């Protein structure tokens, strides 16, 4: 073989060997930039990848007012990357982040932070996604105290891909809530929803929080999101007495089955028991019909006990409610539903008069779900004192409920008015 031919053969071999070592780009990847815009120090508790491989691990510690980053990518044929990381806040609480860039389907992101902190995110679309999270406290502006003649909420949906959604949505301010009509919130759209005050004489002092919820398919909380079922509101504004905007907040969080609601507490200095008392509903529950009673036989054990259209725990202490039973209805699942027009509640060690004649505005109502097991039940119209653990019923707007722990928590009372301290 001539020398020139040998050199050409060697050169070709080197080129081909090098080409064989060139790795294909990953099918999917996520690069995260995390902005800690607080005075808090974050310490990593865990990191996990369900799919893919790390190209840069999340840091062990994130100092206050600091920016960090990490990344993961797919590993294997026709795969995506999905991961999560949890940080502990030295001062208390956790920050949890989750991302998913699947081989097929849209990208998803989720974040969990302590109350009155927010974790909006920007970007994150495409096969090679870049997403930014911003961990920061809510800034609550002073809320002028004035009567309400009208109330409305303006919601702007993000322009990001797949941010729109047609599922049922609800909004509430604590003691009063609404289903938002129409449900359709398309990508980049703006909707103003007028909120019915039901003839109640409210003031801005009755607005305890702003909470936005997205339901699953067919309006069921905890149900599947369905195709393109996630929703990303960009901004929310509360308007009073016409078009006066008194509150405006960035949202920019994906609402989905695992993270269906967004909330900002506007009275953060109020204790948990006081907040509970002020968020008791101003309108009683509707009456249960025969269909409700029969369907409860299926829905309660199979759904509510498994988080579908069901109950969520709260941090409200054990509470005793005193008042008049305005509805007592047994269903076929062994539960009894008792609705109470309240005189007072004792939450933990604190008493609150909620009969509409004292500090807390307007008459308040509370529902009890009691697994009575054949024990005697109160009569409709009877004064009662019923205690137990406090739960969220996640149907519709979400409302507080008391679940008695046994017959010792359900007592009939004499007809005369109750006496006791209140605030």
Image (spheres, helix red, strand yellow):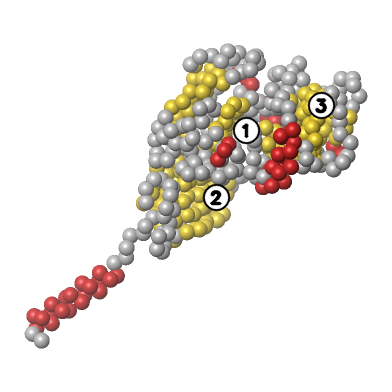
Relative placement, left or right, of 344 versus 228 is: right
Check disc 3: other Cα within 10 Å, few if <14, some if 14-19, many if 20+. Answer: many
Q: Quadrant of residue 35?
A: top left
Density class for disc 1 (Cα within 10 Å; few <14, some 14-19, many ≥20) is: some
Q: Which residue is drawn at 53% across and 26% down?
A: 181
Labels 3 and 1 touching (C-beta < 8 A): no
Q: Position of residue 406 (x, y in %)?
A: 84, 41
Instruction: Tell me if I can see residue 420 in this picture.
Output: no
Label 2 Cα crowd, 10 Å radius (few <14 / some 14-19 / many 20+): many
Q: Earlier in the sequence, mark 3 or mark 1?
A: 3
3 or 2: tag closer to the N-terminus:
2
For image coordinates 25% across by 74% down, the residue present is 17
Disc 3 secondary structure class:
strand
Q: Where is residue 113 in the image (x, y as percent from the top left)?
A: 56, 42
Q: Nearer the viewer, mark 3 or mark 2?
A: 3
Residue at the bottom extreme of this rendering? 1
Question: Can the viewer see residue 211 in this picture?
Answer: yes
With respect to residue 291, does 91 lie above or below? below
Expressed as whole percent of the image width and height from the top left, the position of residue 8 reads 13, 77
Q: Where is residue 221 in the image (x, y as percent from the top left)?
A: 60, 39
* Secondary element at image label 2: strand
What residue did someone put label 3 on? 325
Disc 3 versus disc 1: distance between alpha carbons?
A: 22 Å
- Label 1: which residue? 396
Are discs 3 and 2 less than 8 Å apart at CB? no
């Amino acid at each position: 073989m001539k020398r020139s031919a040998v050199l050409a053969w060697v050169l070709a071999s080197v080129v081909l060997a090098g080409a064989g070592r060139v790795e294909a780009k990953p099918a999917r990847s996520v690069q995260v930039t995390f902005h800690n815009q607080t005075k808090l120090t974050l310490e990593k508790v865990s990191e996990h990848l369900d799919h893919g491989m790390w190209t840069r691990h999340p840091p062990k510690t994130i100092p206050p007012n600091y920016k960090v980053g990490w990344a993961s990518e797919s590993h294997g044929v026709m795969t995506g990357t999905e991961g999560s990381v949890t940080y502990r806040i030295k001062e208390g609480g956790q920050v949890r982040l989750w991302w998913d860039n699947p081989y097929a389907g849209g990208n998803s992101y989720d974040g969990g932070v302590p109350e009155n902190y927010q974790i909006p995110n920007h970007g994150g679309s495409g096969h090679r996604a870049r997403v930014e999270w911003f961990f920061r406290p809510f800034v609550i502006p002073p809320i002028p105290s004035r009567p309400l003649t009208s109330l409305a909420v303006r919601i702007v949906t993000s322009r990001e891909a797949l941010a729109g959604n047609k599922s049922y949505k609800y909004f509430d301010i604590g003691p009063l809530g609404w289903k938002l009509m129409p449900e359709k919130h398309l990508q980049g759209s703006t909707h103003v929803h007028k909120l019915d005050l039901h003839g109640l004489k409210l003031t801005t002092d009755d607005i305890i929080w702003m909470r936005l919820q997205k339901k699953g398919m067919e309006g069921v909380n905890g149900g599947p999101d369905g195709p393109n079922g996630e929703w990303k509101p960009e901004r929310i504004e509360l308007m009073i007495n016409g078009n006066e905007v008194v509150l405006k907040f960035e949202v920019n969080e994906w609402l989905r089955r695992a993270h269906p609601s967004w909330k900002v507490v506007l009275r953060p200095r109020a204790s948990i028991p006081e907040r509970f008392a002020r968020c008791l509903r101003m309108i009683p529950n509707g009456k249960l019909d025969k269909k409700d009673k029969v369907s409860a036989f299926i829905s309660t054990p199979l759904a509510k006990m498994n988080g579908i259209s069901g109950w969520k725990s709260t941090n409200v202490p054990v509470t005793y409610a005193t008042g008049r039973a305005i509805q007592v209805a047994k269903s076929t699942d062994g539960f009894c539903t008792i609705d109470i027009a309240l005189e007072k509640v004792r939450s933990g060690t604190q008493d609150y008069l909620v009969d509409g004649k004292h500090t807390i505005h307007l008459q308040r109502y509370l529902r009890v779900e009691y697994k009575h097991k054949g024990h005697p039940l109160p009569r409709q119209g009877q004064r009662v004192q019923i205690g137990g653990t406090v739960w969220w019923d996640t149907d519709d707007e979400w409302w507080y409920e008391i679940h008695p722990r046994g017959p010792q928590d359900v007592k009939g009372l004499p007809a005369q008015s109750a006496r006791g301290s209140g605030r």
